[in-house]
Every structure is written in C-alpha cells, then in structure tokens.
Image (cartoon, rainbow, N blue to C red):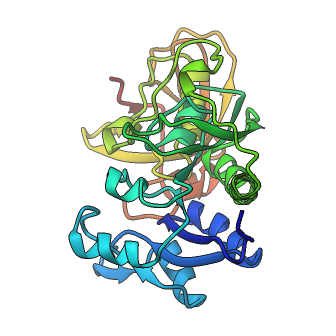
Amino acid sequence: MPDKKDLKIVYMGTPEFAVEPLRCLIDGGYNVVGVITMPDKPAGRGHKIHFSPVKQYALDHHLPLLQPEKLKDADFVQALRDWQADLQVVVAFRMLPEIVWNMPRFGTFNLHASLLPQYRGAAPINWAVINGDRETGITTFFLTHDIDTGKVIQQVSVPIADTDNVEIVHDKLMLLGGKLVVETIEAILHGRVKPIPQEEMAVVGELLPAPKIFKDTCRINWAQPTKKIYDFIRGLSPYPAAWTELNCPNGEEIVVKIFESEKVEEIHGFAPGTILTDGKNYIKVATSDGLILIKSLQFPGKKRLHTEELLRGFKLTEEFCMKVG
C-alpha cells in the first residue's frame, strides 16, 4: 500500500460543509493532486460572481482546480485522467457518471450527512431535524450507479438536542466529517475496509427520503400539532427559513420568515393561525393542540429581529392572523 504522501487524491465538493474535510487532508499532509467544484454562478442583488467555499480554499492553498459544466465532457474527463488519482473523495457535490467515479484504482467514496440508508438525497440534515429525530450522523460509502446507495465504509452517530436547529447540527457533522474522511482514507490505505451493502444494514422504522428543499416546502401549516411546527421551524433555520403569511386587517398579506420559536403546551379554543399578542413582548400563534411562541422573525426587505424589537416598530394586534393551509 502507498504512503499517504504517495496516494494521489482528487477532492470534489462545493459548499462550506465540504471545506472542513479538505482542510483536514491538507493539514494532515495528504497528497491532494486536484480539486473539482461547481462552476461560478452570479448571486445576490448585483449578480456578482462569488466563489464557492471549496474553490476559495483551493485558491488560497494553490491547489489545481477544475470547474466542469458537464461531468461527461471529454476535455474534463481527460484532465481528470491526467491527474492519475488513486482515490477520489466527494463531499456535497453532484451525482457523478460512472466514467468519473470508476476511474481511480481505489474507487471513489462519498461523505453523506446522515446514517445511511436513512435520508438519501440532497437535504439530509434538514429532514432529520424537521422529522424530530433524536439522532443523525455521517456516513462514508463507495459510489455506485444509484445516488447514495453504495456500500457503507464507516459511520458516526450524533445526537440531536430538542433545541438544535439545522445550523447547529450542520456544524457538528461538518467537524466530524473532516475526521471521518481522514479515518476512511487511512482504512483504505491499510486494507482495513470491509464495505457493507446498505440492504444488509438494520433499519429501525421506515426509510425516509431527504429530497431537495424548495420555497413551497418551507411554508408553515398552522393546523398541524405544535411539536411538528416547532421541529419544522428549527429544521429550516437559519436557511432557507420557514415562512408564513400574516393576514392584516386591511387585507394585505405579509410574508414572514420565522427562525426561532418555543413550544407552548396549552389547551385553548382558538382556531389554528390565531395570533395572541400584547403588542410589546410576545407573539403566540395557535396550532391544532397548543401554541407556538415566536422568538425571532423577519419581514420582507428587513433584517432578522427578536420579537420585542419587531413589535417596537410594527403595531401588531390580535386582529391579525396567520394564513392556514
């Protein structure tokens, strides 16, 4: 087996989650011969070009970089082949064609932010929190034809506290992910890997998917139970953020993003979406079986505020209500 300095690694990733494992490889003295990330895209009001976090890290550390539009493009495939990688590592990137993932002699493995086979898909951290899970984790697995279905190499589980939002869980998994990528490479280097087919792994309950989250996915349904709404809000906080529509007495509707809330177990006779407020310190919204206390929120074109801050500048009364359905 080659030494870690002789093992040629190609790294693929784009968002912040993928920076930590790359940093661990570089700091650990591994031979990263190239980095692949998504093409640059304009973002924000000025449509300025912003580099992905992985691209910025690669540039800062003078790592060879490719940003292919199409992963089957002949020029890209040849450029990748020229790096002569022994192993490819993928973290939060794209689905790879077989000509890419099957190229290195030791194969290609992926770091996924769930305990596979649970939460295959694009948003595993969000859905684990939205569904009120008490545990999640990270998995390394070898890539194959179907997304997130390859043989599992290693897993690490992480508890989810009832107060954790997506940002907190994301950061926990990101730090552990860097360590697990290094451990997985070491296991491959020393021939200690015994991959397990996912269909042979024990699963408690049904398999839940983790599809991509769109704007409509994030709309709050106030007719649901309190805990379900509470988990929904923290499962989308701080990004992309759960939202609702505030119905005003004059007929106007204001889209409101909600970032932080608390469950209030209280028997009441109010219709879901009813607002209870003193106009100064608190906003509570009725659910099917209790209340949600809103702690921080955002109006269109404004910054995120704590409830008391918002109420100092916006006159909210119980004539307002949240749109249901």
Across and down, in percent, residue 172 comes to 73, 51
Total marks placed: 0
Q: Is residue 265 left or right of residue 299?
A: right
User: For this rendering, which residue is in front, 172 or 183?
Assistant: 183
Q: Quadrant of the N terminus?
A: bottom right
- Residue 60: image quadrant is bottom right
Across and down, in percent, residue 267 comes to 64, 9
Q: Is residue 278 visible?
A: no
- Residue 38: image quadrant is bottom left
Q: Is residue 43 left or right of residue 251?
A: right
Across and down, in percent, residue 270 comes to 50, 14
Taking the spot 56% from the left edge, 56% from the top edge, the residue there is 106
User: For this rendering, which residue is in front, 90 or 100?
Assistant: 100
User: For this rendering, which residue is in front, 275 or 194?
Assistant: 194
Q: Is residue 64 left or right of residue 156?
A: left
User: For this rendering, which residue is in front, 266 or 218?
Assistant: 218
Q: Residue furthest front?
A: 1
Across and down, in percent, residue 41 comes to 30, 74
Above/below status of 173 relative to 115: below
Q: Quadrant of the C terminus?
A: top left
Above/below status of 25 relative to 60: above
Taking the spot 73% from the left edge, 38% from the top edge, the residue there is 163
Q: Is residue 130 visible?
A: yes
Taking the spot 56% from the left edge, 35% from the top edge, the residue there is 151
